[in-house]
Image (spheres, grey):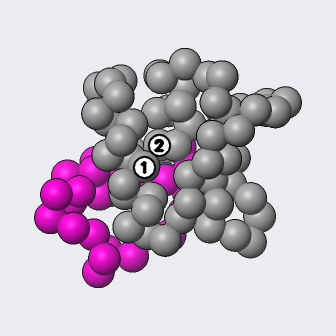
């Protein structure tokens, strides 16, 4: 996935379809993003550059359970990429 604003927007939409909220906050992050325990809120370091934001959200996507029933046709290519990445890891 290219590191573009469009890619970031698509990943954010994917999270939203899955019932997650993506928030951009400042703070002392050890990584570019984190998921608040037992919630569906992902907090991204707003001072990270675009590449770090995308990589951080992508890594969280690889770890969360995805409901394939709610994925729109528009965002299904992202789901396919997630599945490919999971089989590689």
* Residue 66 magenta-highlighted: yes
Residue 33 visible here:
no
Number of other residues with Cα within 10 Å of mark 1, as a class: few under 14, some 14 to 19, many 20 or more: many
- Say which quarter of the image contains residue 28: top right
**Under tag 2, what secondary structure?**
helix
For residue 12, the mark is 1
**Under tag 1, what secondary structure?**
helix
Q: Residue furthest bottom?
A: 69
Disc 2 target residue:
58
- For the N terminus, the quadrant is top left
Expressed as whole percent of the image width and height from the top left, the position of residue 16 reads: 43, 62
- Taking the image as shown, residue 60 lies to the left or right of residue 1, namely right
Considering only vertical position in the picture, is 18 above or below 15?
below
Expressed as whole percent of the image width and height from the top left, the position of residue 26 reads: 76, 32
| Distance from the alpha carbon under mark 1 to that under mark 2 | 10 Å
Number of other residues with Cα within 10 Å of mark 2, as a class: few under 14, some 14 to 19, many 20 or more: some
Most common SS among magenta residues = helix
Expressed as whole percent of the image width and height from the top left, the position of residue 85 reads: 37, 46
| Residue range (magenta) | 59-87
């Amino acid at each position: 996935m290219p590191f573009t604003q469009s890619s970031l927007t698509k990943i954010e939409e994917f999270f939203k379809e899955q019932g997650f909220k993506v928030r951009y906050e400042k703070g002392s992050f050890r990584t570019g993003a984190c998921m608040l325990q037992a919630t569906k809120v992902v907090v991204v370091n707003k001072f990270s550059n675009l590449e770090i934001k995308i990589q951080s959200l992508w890594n969280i996507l690889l770890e969360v359970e995805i409901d394939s029933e709610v994925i729109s046709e528009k965002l299904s290519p992202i789901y396919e990429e997630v599945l490919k990445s999971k089989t590689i890891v």
